[in-house]
Image: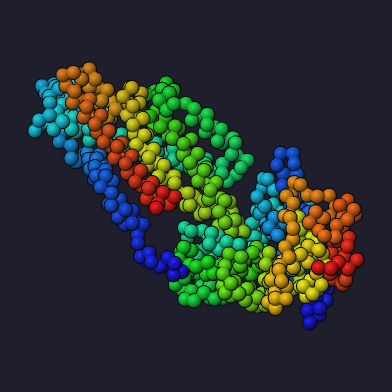
Amino acid sequence: MNDDKTIVAQGARPVLDIRDFSVELRSGKTISPIVDKVNFEVHEGRTLGIVGESGCGKSMLSLGIMKLVPSPPACIAGGKVLLDGTDLVPCSEREMQEVRGNRISMIFQEPMTSLNPVYTVGFQIIEALRAHSSLTSAQARSRAIDLLREVGISNPEKRVEEYPHRLSGGMRQRVMIAIALACNPRVLIADEPTTALDVTIQAQILDLMRSLKSDSGTAIILISHDLGVIAEMADDVVVMYAGRIIEQAPVHSLFAAPSHPYTQGLLGSMPTVDGDQERLQPIPGTVPPPHDRPHGCAFHPRCKLSDETCRTQRPPLEEKISGHKVACWHTGLGARP
Amino acid sequence: MTAHSSAPADVKPGRYLLAALGRDPVSCISLAMLTTLFLCAALAPWLAPYNPLSINMSRVLQGPSLDHFFGTDGQGRDIFSRSMFGLRLTIMLGFTAIFVGGTIGTLFGLLAAFYPKTDTLLMRLMDIILSFPAILFGLAVAAIIGSGTTAVIIALSVSTTPLVARIARGAALMVLAQDYVSSGRAIGLHDWTLLRRYVLPNCVSTIVVFLTLRLGQAILLGASLSFLGLGTQPPTPELGTMAAQGIGFFFFAPHVTLIPSVTIFLLVLSMNILGDSLRDILDPRLRS
């Protein structure tokens, strides 16, 4: 049934269409690409998962979509971010302020530090509402209470008056979600929304995001290094390595038949419940720093299959099976885990 | 939310501050002294037993007595009354300068932190101002616009601005690195709203603590400028000017110089002690 949805969605125009999007880090004369010509689409009511190790450019990509990369030193080097057909890259800061929080919102990784400590949570939701609509303060307040109720906070009439330090991490992340959803955004970018939370709260937050997605039709970009979260939440998955997309596939296809050696490595380094592996298989080495990326395939120094071609030529992202794209010279050869 | 519910729910920040100060006897004494001095200054027109300007040549340079608690000066004016009015002016000079310098400095510091492009320009400008000693500044201002209260206020404000700008910039840079500023940006707030609601309130305690410490210095500097004859001109009572006027009779009537000097000393001392305690209470890094 997942396939049916994919076909339907492919006919419609994507909510967010990222084309050849690049972010660079410029310090002095060295220019290091952090996100390198990335392409993907997100459709209404669907979730795109972005996976990768620390330092592969996931967070910079999400900040780049919002045009919030810390500049200097980082800057958007090219490409297009089409939100409902309009390109955001040439937009002015003032136009972006209209888009942020209104049509694209974001949830951050650290709920403990993502709320302004000097204002009540109610004030912060009202602030988001009033930045993009002409609600009166009484209307905004009652909407804030509704939002808190929607994200599953009990006794919302009382909670709107609370300061962030009186809420737990899970509660704060719920408040962050309420703020992000305040203006019914078209796209919600969740950058590791559950990483800082414990597992039970994590499950609750993921459930919440899922039900909100099906209620509102908001498209979600879920960034995570946790493959379990991705498997549970995403419809499509993008695997990033060293700033590039190396594998892109519908979630079931990716987990059933991971094609890139890196994706296989990621899956191999995860414990399974049935536990037929003796030991977990780590991927040797680390992600190369952005100013010192290897020639050819960026993964070749860590790859068991690498050969001369891998060292000299960068593999293109090509569709090997329907909907399943891989950037590897060896996938046709039937790479084994 | 259970983690913090052990703290009493409705502690007013002011009451918390007073309670924390009350635990330290030295702060208590300074607070009492400062309150007395401020009351004397504020109520000078009603409490002062004599007109601070009225000359009585039959009672020149008298020592302390029941008629004149602090004695009289070279022109027979009551030093007690003059000290009260002088304290009033000295405190007003200090506060005005701290307010003006603090406001401009905070604005510069926040702008420099928020817009990295203006950082170099603003902060180098502040460095240039900082390289002049405040007394030299006072001399220059007095030379340009003539000596007087205005000259002192300008000199003190200008010399306070770069110090506050540095402190504010540092505090703002720390706040700007916090996640909640990114989330404020991500909900589409304008720069001005971010500065006003996110950056300023979160660095205001650092700035206020610095200003309370600076207030003592500013008062001292203001009195020094007046002492040198660059500030308030006689016969207007100002503690620095009064101290300067007594120098000629120091060996046979030391109280004329000593009383205003001791008043300045007590004022600045209690302000500094209170400023220190305030920093200990407000700065979470120093809290054990």
Residue A62 coordinates in the image, percent (x, y): 69, 59
Residue B42 coordinates in the image, percent (x, y): 25, 42
Residue B205 relative to residue A49: left or right? left
Residue A225 coordinates in the image, percent (x, y): 68, 64
Q: Residue A245: which quarter of the image?
A: bottom right
Quadrant position of the N terminus of chain A in the picture: bottom right
Quadrant position of the C terminus of chain A in the picture: bottom right
Using the image as rendered, state which of residue A146 and residue A73 is in the foreground: A73
Most extreme residue toward the left, as rendered? Answer: B66
Q: Residue A103: which quarter of the image?
A: bottom right
Task: Using the image, determine if residue B129 lies above or below residue B2.
Answer: above
Using the image as rendered, state which of residue A287 and residue B12 is in the foreground: A287
Q: How is the image coloured?
A: rainbow
Residue A145 relative to residue A82: left or right? left
The residue depicted at 46 percent of the width and 39 percent of the height is B164
* Residue A243 in sight here: no
* Residue B131 in sight here: yes
Task: Using the image, determine if residue A222 lies above or below residue B114.
Answer: below
Residue B4 coordinates in the image, percent (x, y): 42, 65
Most extreme residue toward the front, as rendered? Answer: A278
The residue depicted at 50 percent of the width and 46 percent of the height is B171
Q: Residue A268: which quarter of the image?
A: bottom right
Residue A183 relative to residue A57: left or right? left
